[in-house]
Amino acid sequence: MAPPPPSQEFHNHLHPSLTSEALQKRMNAPEGSLHAAAEDIRDKLNEKIAAYEALLREYDIAEDNASVAQRDTERQS
């Protein structure tokens, strides 16, 4: 006959971070949860997108300025 499995209390003592209560707290915590991690990723991506869009606007302005300079040079020739 096999010995009975260890009690939950014994398991919690050996691995307190693996208790169902600890897992529930971890999953629902404001930080460290999957939802919080997804929000962090979304925020970082939004920041990168905004920076990229700002860079594209700067390139458009630089291109417009170069076109104006090109036309001025052609008129002076």
Image (cartoon, grey):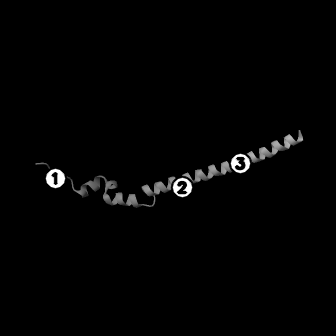
How packed is label 3: few (under 14 Cα within 10 Å), some, or many (20 or more)? few
Dot 1 lies on which element? loop
Lower sequence index among marks 1 and 3: 1
Point out residue 57 in the picture as x, y percentages from the top left corner: 68, 50
- Residue 51 picture location, percent across and down: 63, 51
Image location of residue 3, percent across then percent down? 14, 50
Using the rendered view, name the quadrant where residue 20 is placed: bottom left
Nearest the camera: 5 or 70?
Answer: 70
**What amino acid is at disc 1?**
Pro
Residue 16, given in percent of the width and then of the height, sits at 32, 55
Mark 1 or mark 3: which is in front?
Answer: 3
The answer to which quarter of the image holds residue 23 is bottom left
Query: Looking at the image, is mark 1 or mark 2 nearer the viewer?
Result: 2
Q: Residue at x 21, y 53 (%)?
A: 6
- What kind of residue is marked 3? Asp
Of the residues under marks 1 and 2, which one precedes in the sequence?
1
- Whole-angstrom CA distance, mark 1 to mark 2, is 49 Å
Per the image, the residue denoted by label 1 is: 4
